[in-house]
Structure formats: structure tokens, C-alpha cells
Amino acid sequence: MNQNFLLAALFAVSAALLTFIVAHVLSRAAVKYRENFTEQAKVKLSDLFLFIEPERLFIINMVIIFMSFLLVWLWTGHWIPALIASFLVGFSPPILYRMFKKRRNQTFIKHLPDMLQSCSTAMKAGSSLNQAIESVVMEESGPISQEFDLFLRELRVGVDFNEALNNLHDRIPEMDLKLVISGMQISREIGGNLADTLERMADTLRRKIEMEGKIDSLTAQGRAQGFVMTALPILLGVILYQMEPEQMSLLWTRWYGWICIGIVVFLEVIGYVFIRKIVNIDV
């Protein structure tokens, strides 16, 4: 009797200690995740010129994580797929930041030739480079206006012209912009007609963007096939689950099912990467 009582007490103390350790580790991980999320959100959103409170964005992120866990759990009836879905959603913000940053950079480069042409026209009419850029900032909108407005602000507070251009390239690390910055710096150092230089660069970039658009249209079918081939096994698995739920549930209720899922995910990622490598053509 005493021995059973001691074993029960030891088990209760061990369970309580384990619960305390797990709760402590999870609380520290949650605090660390919140700090990293808010810090990265503040930096990334400022790069995108999106002024949203990081704490509010963190609350929205936690609500989305909880809703994804709940929906997957209600749909599958198992907590492991729901936990995986919530982890994927929790680590998705950096990927979204990169997507938004890439789209913003593409928009900037798309409008860069028109901006250079406008500056060239204004300079031929008698304006200085700063005055031409100011007129473009007032007329344009979006990334072009935001980035060159920040460029002008740096010049007003005493930053060197070349350093301000380098800071612009640090914010928009694109090869096309690097070409424009190098041309402007060389033209200012060795002299020459900067208006004609800007006009030639605008024409060169416009032709390059036109060629890239033609290549994108020709490779659009390949990219669509990559998405279809990647999503096909997932859609087929959903259909089979609706037809044979008991058999398909073995994928996440047995150890060999998880191995099968891991192999499928690995092959899916490899196939998608190879398709992207084939259809992505650098100009």
C-alpha cells in the first residue's frame, strides 16, 4: 500500500515537474517569437513604406495561426496535421515579406524608364537634376515617388550625392538600378550631357523590360504547368480522402504514413524547383 502510494506520488511529482518545464519552455519560446516577429516586422514594413503597428500585426498573426489550427483540426479530426498547418502559417510572414519586397522592386524597375525620361526632358528644359527629380516625385506615385523622395531628403540633410545613390541601391538591390546609378555617377565625375545619358539609359531599360515581358509570356505556360503539377498530388489526396477517409487517414495515424508524406513533400519541392530553374531565363 505504501509502495503504491509512493509510486503514485512520484508519478504525480514527475508529471507536475514535466508540465512546469514544458510550460516554461513554451512561454519563453512564445516571448522570443513575439520579440523576433515585432522586430522584423518593424524593419521589413519600413522597407516597404508600410507604417503598421507591429504589435497589432502580431495579434493578427496569432489569430490566423489559431484559426488555421482550428480549421484543419475540424476538417481532419487529428491534431498533428493541424499543428503542422499552424507552424507553417507561423513561419510564413518572412516569405510574405520577401514576396511583397520583390513585387515592389519590380514595380520600381517598371516605372524607372519613364522616370528617367521625365528627368531628361526636364533637364533639357533648363532644370537641374534635383529639380527634375523633385518634379517627378510630385507627379509620380508608388515606389518611384517614395524612394526618390527619400533620396532628396538625404541630400537636403547633407548626405553626399554618391552616397545617397548607393543608399538607394541598398534599398532597391536591382541590377537595372545599379546600371542607372553607375551611369549617373560616371557622368557627374567626368562631365558630359547628363540629360542625354539619362535618355539613353531610359531607352535601354525600356527595351530590356520589353524583352523580359516577351520571355515571361513565352514561359508562362511552363510556370503554370509547374503550379499544376505541384498541386495535382495535393488535390488528388483531398479527393481520395473524401472517397476513402479511413484508408487515407493512415497517412497521419501511422508512422509509415508520415514517411510517405515526407517523401511526397520532398519530391514535390524538388520537382517545383527544377521546373522554376528551367522556365526562369535571365536577360
Image (cartoon, rainbow, N blue to C red):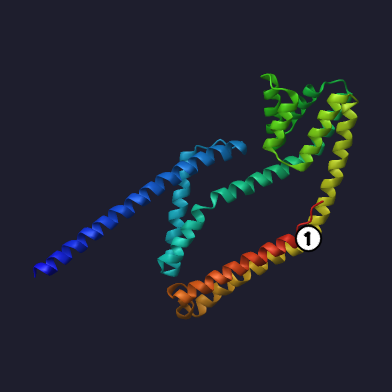
Q: Is residue 51 left or right of residue 192?
A: left
Number of marks in the rendered image:
1
Q: What x and y, as percent, mark residue 202?
A: 85, 37
Q: What x and y, as percent, mark residue 100?
A: 63, 46
Q: Is residue 8 left or right of residue 22?
A: left
Q: What x and y, as percent, mark residue 219?
A: 78, 60
Q: Amino acid at mark 1?
A: Thr
Residue 272 sits in quarter: bottom right
Residue sitting at 56 percent across and 37 percent down? Answer: 43
Q: What x and y, as percent, mark residue 243?
A: 51, 79
Residue sitting at 49 percent across and 44 percent down? Answer: 37
- When the figure is inspected, residue 134 is found, relative to residue 272, above or below; the finding is above
Residue 249 visible in the displayed image:
no
Residue sitting at 80 percent across and 25 percent down? Answer: 132
- When the figure is inspected, residue 231 is found, relative to residue 125, above or below; the finding is below
User: SS of the residue at dot 1?
Assistant: loop
Residue pushed farthest front?
A: 3
Closer to the camera in the image, 126 or 43 = 43
Residue 166 sits in quarter: top right
